[in-house]
Image: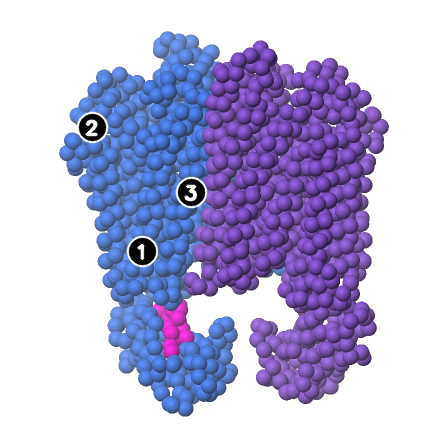
Chain colours: A purple, B blue
């Protein structure tokens, strides 16, 4: 029960720590200290025409909003007539005196003040602009400040009149009211996160209570669980050093450049939350494998329930902790920028989990196979092989902890990116801009939607295993996912309607969200199509193996390359649809939509390795044919869900990185033309960005080879020095192998990890345009390469399995030997290099976003 | 002697045809019909300050220049003082009456006319602008038209005065003179092209005169030569259909959209020239192989001379025909836009040569090996194998004709791109813009530099073989290349100085040129470093083969990916240096610089396959140990030059595509901000562009597999049905195999070829921004992928050879078998997919450039 207590303690401790940090009723929004009990202003916006004249028009443009002080911009366009015009803008303040309203500035269409061209009638109240040319546009900036203490909803009326020979006037009423609605959104997000964590806790406790009455099963499972913990403990030591280094670096930047100090606690909390989610997920998975195997004696449904429930603990812990972290930090500090620190923390852990875990799992795999299977001739997963536990640990390290950290990063980063873009505003259906500052609806909407997603995921989860014994495990899980997705679509539409009212805007935002959901499904299905041996592509790879290892490899590489087409088109379609409907904000929203029901999609991902281990344990522990076959059926379903999950992880990484990239471009505050393709620094950045995924993959693949060598030597040493291993009389030193693999993985991940962090930092210091190019180049190439590697690797794996099923000569045939070569190449492709690229593109984007103040300072010094 | 006559006839015919097209003394420059005998104006430009006032300044900006009518823009910036200003701009016309000079327009900094704000003092001569704000900038556009008949050099003085409270005035003299200098540049280019062709012809004739007195040698060489011709003849049939289709399509566009009709003849001539250059090169190469082998009995130097001389025929034919085509067409039509048609023609042939040739060579190779070596157990290159000749033909088709067409395309396209960018102008050292319309120096400079390059290449060529018998073949060729390069640098510096005078400008242009030359050398050397078995990286790949085929493949893929780093950085450095010094024009100039001495670099490339074939012939014909060893030494050098040549081809393709891309962005006339990374169409384009190289590679690699299958069946059929083959009594039907491979290659290249042409067309019709993104994405990913595939393939090949030399167990060991798997995968990497990407990125860029009028028309209709 140690792990159960750990889970409870960890989550409770984190929650208490964070809640204790809440500094009473005081908080800062937009960098400004305010009394949180105070209300904040809130505006609606729409296009309107001035009455009484068809050839004059008024447009409400951007509404900038800080805390209680807002700026509202009216665009006044002089109609195209030959008459000379003069405009008088008059402000009628609201009845109550709690509002301080005045005309702050009048600007031309290039945002230059033209106040000196106006005649002041009443200071701050009424101005006249003479001789306004036809078609000339001016913007009247009105400053609104609420000085009162309590919420008010009475409308503030601003009247503007245009006068010409005909003498007409028109007015527009803007409703200004104070509201706590945005906090309501955050409370819902926070509540959903806690409910998700609570559901995960209850599920985990129920799983821990299941007793497995088989010593051998418990023993094997125990080895794996201890090995996994050993890896995590070793990894934590590296992570702590890394965190200290980053904190020191950030501390220096805070001191020297006056950078936002809140980034530091946010970074540390992000790292701890991600690590905790991974730790919990892996503990549950390594505990549930034995219980799944044991439950299989009660039938498929019982086994499915255990395996899936353990996955849902992982899924809900990831989304629960992710959303809890984001919403709590935003609640306390009211500052979106500092959340980049949280994202950076999550990304850093993901880097270690994916790169380190990827190297670990394949080093152990290759080491175990080369000495055990090839040299000693003992079967796979034989307990006599010292590297067997490391090998099994590796599966969990890669597919559970690595995948979890990867998606924790995507989940958190997509929400943060959407919030950051929400500040700047989004182009709604008609093209108008609409926004609401650091606490505007657009900013907190992602938190609300994520919260809704957690509810939907929980409800979907309850349906899995609820179907009868005759419903296949795949159908049960699919039903759960679909229920969640449909529910999510319905509820989010309702919420959008309640928040925005206008159907055009609601539809635009809703379709952006749904575009992301749909892209996730498409990419997952394409992955399944190309990598499943039920379909022609992978069968062709199998067939190529009959002609030789070379043809098998060429066929797999060709398949991998070809399989990138539809995922790329799906991402392209999502970008275009989301942008046309809702601007850059829409792109981020599509990523939020894709990841909203992560609570259940990650559960099905994690189900895979649990069922896989269960089948392995059933075989190793000799639990009998019936149980083994039941577990194997569950495992077969796991292969499909794992393939879909991999596609989903890449797709979400691509969209999340794009959202972060959009936030970077938007936040960097550079001129649009500086990000032009005509700028050679952009092109240079594109080249470097296009190179990095290749370089990173090369280093990751070479690392597997090198780390495997150390493992091979250790396994050989144990067989040589520990007497009685081969006879099963002596227990091999499993932990030594785990340590070797751990050490090798951690050592080898340093160079690629440094590249991911240091290259964008250095390039950004030289040129922010080049950094923009670098991000774009790396996202494009990284995405395509990641899809290619994952699908080629998955296909080689299943092509080999297809032959093992008895096709093209079956196990032991030449075709099988050739297919094994493909699988060997595919392993680091799909489990090390490919998934690491997910992290690379997100991490570099968040580094770029986080260090904008540094880049601006250094670029300012240089040129 | 048939081929000799063909060479003579082809070149002479082409030259006569083109010269006959010269329509007397009339030509069109900038779309305007003018009398070519007339002179044209020409201006210098510099930054200058108005005398007598330190706080006022004048800048000369763009000088637009058509034929004899030029527009000169003066930027007048009002100094930052509080005084009110009025400027009077006065033009003092030159003494002679042959000049028509007047102020055409006065514009603000957004190029809007402000003529209505001025007071006209003397029409076209003197204007006053009142109340010029501090820091406001205006541009005075002066139109200059030379009406005279003969050349004049007297300066035209334009005086502008700025008046304020202090009353001061300042003047600037702009020298306007008429000159034939630009035509002089073209004449030099044309002369150099003809001299290059003449030198090639003389060399070819001398080679044809060498008699090989060995029936067997002649017989083998004859088979290869006939096979090569058979492939070309079949390819021509497809090319003719393609040309007709394109001509019809262009014809429709000319009729419907009023597109430039001259594109059509230019396209046809470009295609014919490229095909002719490839045809001549391949004929010479397939003739010289036997003569090289025969010459080896007189020693290494004699063999080197023959092989290298045959290469120099190819090299000089490519540059001679390329430059002849460009300069003649420009001379006749005086229109840069129509040259895009010439480039498109050259690119189309390159597509067929590289993709078709690449599929051909590997299909024949695999087919020959699978049946001959594996099934029948006869050695490689055994005349009993029906596919042997196809295999040998394939080497020539890929490495000679394919490489030649590839570099013909790069050579021609880089010159055209530089000319197109020369019209728009280049930013010189200080950042000022300077240009000279359709016949300005910047426009014709690339022709001159290319011409100089041909002279330098010829001189360098003369030094190869001039060294003593003790100088190694590699040193001799290196010496030739270095002599050419150094000579090129010196002469181009002198020419730039004579053309531009000002040291800053000269240095900027010179260094841009040299940056390209240097990048070419760096990329070549990196290729050599990674792929040569003298160095650690490839030896490590060899060593990995001892651990299995999988490790060998992973090591090779890792090496390929890693090897992309330095080439990418070299391109990035070139882009940045060239742009900072000379703007977008500088990037194109660096490509011209890289390719200027192509006459000799391509000679060393072509030397490789000739020496390779010579060694093969020496062995097959049993010419004795001494000759064979001499030929093999020459062949070993060829491997190195081939590797360097491959790197050079990729590097030049990358720079050329970038130059075309710059020309596209520049010519498309869209707003810079439309090409911003914030534009989702750009990002969507980047994704599609990033995808295409993967898709293209996948199709190319799968095509090899499919085409090889047909070959295998044909070879099996011949062994089965033709009695006496195995006993050497019956001659196999070589031509049937050649036909099968040809047919397969041509059939399989259709889909990838269509993608390369159709995708940019379709995307451009939807959105030109997306097309810009597509080009950038494809160039980046295509370049990195091409380097990776070429180097991984080269490394696997040499890793196998390293083992065959006796390392790691030598021939027949497990390591060798594993290395063969790597080589099998590497073959389509390095000889089919990789080189095809060179074409893909250039072809898509030229398609984009050519069809801008179509895109503009359709975008105009849609949005």
Asked which quadrant contains residue B691, the reply is top right
Q: Which mark is residue A791?
A: none
Q: Residues within 10 Å of mark 3 (few under 14, many from 20)?
A: many
**Alpha-carbon span between mark 2 and mark 1:** 38 Å
> Label 2 lies in what chain?
B
With respect to residue A524, does A416 lie above or below? below
Judged from the image, the secondary structure of the residue bearing numbered disc 2 is helix
Residue B646 rendering spot, x and y as whole percentages = 37, 37
Is B163 in front, or is B104? B163
Q: Quadrant of the C terminus of chain A?
A: bottom left
Q: Where on the picture, by quarter, is residue A74?
A: bottom right
Q: Which residues are magenta?
A: B57-75
Residue to which mark 3 is pinned: B565
Instruction: Name the quadrant containing residue A362.
Output: top right
Q: Element under label 1?
A: helix
The residue shown at (38%, 74%) is B59
Which comes before the other along the chain, label 2 or label 3? Answer: 2
Q: Earlier in the sequence, mark 3 or mark 1?
A: 1
> What's the distance in space between the residues labelled 2 and 3, CA to CA?
37 Å
Mark 1 surroundings within 10 Å by alpha-carbon count, few (fewer than 14), some (14 through 19), many (20 or more)? many
Q: How far, Cα to Cα, is label 3 from label 1?
A: 23 Å
Assess disc 2: are there few (<14), some (14-19) or many (≥20) residues with their C-alpha within 10 Å of its C-alpha: many
Left or right of residue B761: residue B75: left
Can you say whether A306 is above or below A456 in the image?
above
Say which label, 2 or 1, has the lower sequence index: 2
Asked whether B72 falls inside the magenta stretch, the response is yes
- Residue A634 placed where, x, y %? 73, 25
Looking at the rendered structure, whether the residues under marks 2 and 1 are on a common chain is answered as yes
Residue A170, image x and y in percent? 75, 79
On residue B300, the disc is 2
Q: What residue sits 64% from the left and 26% below the top? A: A224
What subunit carries mark 1? B
């Amino acid at each position: 029960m140690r792990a159960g207590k750990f889970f409870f303690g960890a989550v409770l401790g984190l929650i208490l720590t964070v809640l204790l940090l809440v500094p009473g009723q005081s908080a800062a929004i937009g960098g400004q200290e305010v009394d949180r009990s105070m209300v904040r202003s809130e505006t609606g916006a729409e296009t309107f025409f001035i009455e009484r004249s068809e050839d004059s028009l008024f447009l409400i443009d951007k509404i900038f909003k800080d805390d209680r002080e807002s700026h509202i911009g009216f665009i006044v366009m002089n109609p195209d007539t030959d008459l000379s015009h003069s405009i008088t803008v008059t402000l009628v303040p609201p009845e109550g005196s709690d509002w301080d309203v005045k005309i702050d500035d009048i600007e031309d269409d290039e945002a230059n003040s033209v106040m000196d061209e106006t005649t002041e009638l009443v200071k701050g109240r009424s101005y006249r602009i003479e001789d306004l040319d036809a078609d000339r546009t001016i913007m009247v900036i009105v400053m609104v400040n609420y000085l009162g203490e309590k919420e008010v909803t009475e409308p503030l009326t601003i009247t503007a009149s245009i006068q010409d020979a005909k003498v007409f006037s028109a007015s527009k009423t803007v409703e200004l009211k104070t509201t706590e609605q945005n906090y309501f959104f955050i409370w819902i997000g926070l509540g959903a996160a806690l409910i998700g964590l609570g559901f995960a806790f209850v599920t985990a406790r129920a799983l821990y209570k299941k007793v497995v009455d088989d010593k051998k099963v418990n023993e094997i499972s125990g080895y794996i669980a201890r090995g996994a913990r050993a890896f995590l403990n070793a990894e934590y030591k590296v992570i702590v050093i890394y965190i200290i280094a980053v904190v020191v670096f950030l501390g220096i930047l805070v001191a020297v450049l006056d950078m936002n100090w809140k980034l530091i606690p946010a970074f540390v909390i992000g790292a701890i939350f991600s690590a905790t989610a991974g730790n919990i997920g892996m503990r549950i998975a390594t505990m549930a494998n034995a219980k799944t195997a044991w439950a299989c004696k009660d039938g498929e449904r019982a086994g499915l329930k255990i395996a899936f429930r353990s996955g849902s603990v992982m899924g809900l812990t990831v989304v629960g902790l992710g959303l809890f972290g984001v919403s709590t930090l935003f609640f306390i500090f009211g500052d979106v920028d500092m959340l980049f620190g949280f994202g950076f923390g999550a990304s850093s852990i993901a880097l270690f989990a994916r790169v380190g875990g990827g190297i670990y799992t394949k080093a152990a795999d290759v080491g175990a196979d080369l000495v055990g299977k090839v040299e000693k001739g003992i079967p796979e997963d034989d307990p006599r092989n010292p590297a067997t536990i490391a090998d099994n640990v590796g599966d969990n390290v890669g597919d559970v902890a690595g995948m979890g950290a990867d998606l924790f990063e995507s989940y958190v980063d997509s929400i943060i990116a959407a919030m950051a873009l929400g500040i700047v505003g989004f182009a709604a259906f008609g093209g108008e801009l609409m926004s609401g500052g650091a606490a505007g609806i657009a900013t907190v909407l992602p938190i609300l939607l994520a919260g809704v997603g957690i509810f939907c995921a929980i409800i979907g989860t309850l349906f899995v295993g609820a179907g009868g014994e005759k419903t296949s495990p795949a159908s049960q899980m699919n039903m759960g996912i679909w229920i969640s997705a449909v529910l999510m679509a319905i509820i989010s539409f309702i919420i959008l309607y309640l928040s925005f009212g206008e159907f055009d805007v609601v539809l635009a935002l809703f379709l952006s969200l749904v575009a992301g959901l749909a892209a996730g499904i498409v990419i997952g299905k394409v992955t399944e199509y190309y990598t499943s041996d039920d379909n022609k592509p992978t069968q062709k790879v199998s067939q190529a193996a009959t002609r030789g290892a070379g043809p098998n490899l060429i066929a797999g590489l060709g398949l991998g390359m070809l399989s990138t087409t539809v995922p790329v088109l799906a991402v392209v379609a999502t970008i275009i649809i989301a942008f046309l409907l809702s601007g850059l904000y829409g792109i981020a929203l599509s990523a939020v939509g894709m990841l909203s029901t992560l609570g259940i999609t990650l559960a099905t991902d994690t189900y895979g390795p649990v069922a896989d281990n269960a089948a392995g344990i059933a075989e190793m522990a000799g639990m009998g044919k019936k149980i083994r076959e039941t577990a194997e059926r569950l495992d077969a379903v796991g292969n499909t869900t794992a393939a879909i999950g991999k596609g989903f992880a890449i797709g979400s990484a691509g969209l999340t990185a794009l959202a972060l990239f959009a936030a970077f471009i938007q936040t960097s505050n550079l001129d649009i033309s500086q990000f032009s393709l005509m700028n050679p620094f952009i092109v240079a950045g594109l080249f470097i960005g296009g190179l990095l995924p290749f370089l990173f993959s090369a280093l990751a693949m070479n690392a597997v080879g090198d780390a495997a060598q150390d493992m091979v030597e250790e396994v050989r040493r144990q067989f040589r020095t520990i007497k009685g291993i081969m006879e099963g009389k002596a227990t091999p030193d499993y932990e030594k192998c785990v340590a070797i693999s751990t050490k090798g993985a951690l050592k080898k991940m340093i160079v690629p990890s440094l590249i991911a962090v240091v290259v964008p930092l250095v390039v950004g210091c030289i040129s922010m345009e080049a950094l923009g190019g670098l991000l774009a180049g790396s996202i494009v190439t990284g995405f395509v390469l990641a899809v290619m590697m994952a699908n080629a690797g998955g296909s080689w794996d299943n092509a080999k399995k297809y032959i093992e099923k008895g096709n093209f000569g079956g196990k032991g045939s030449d075709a099988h030997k050739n297919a094994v070569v493909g699988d060997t190449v595919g392993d680091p492709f799909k489990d090390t290099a490919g998934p690491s690229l997910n992290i690379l593109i997100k991490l570099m984007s968040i580094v770029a976003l986080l260090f904008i103040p540094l880049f601006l300072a250094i670029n300012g010094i240089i040129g």
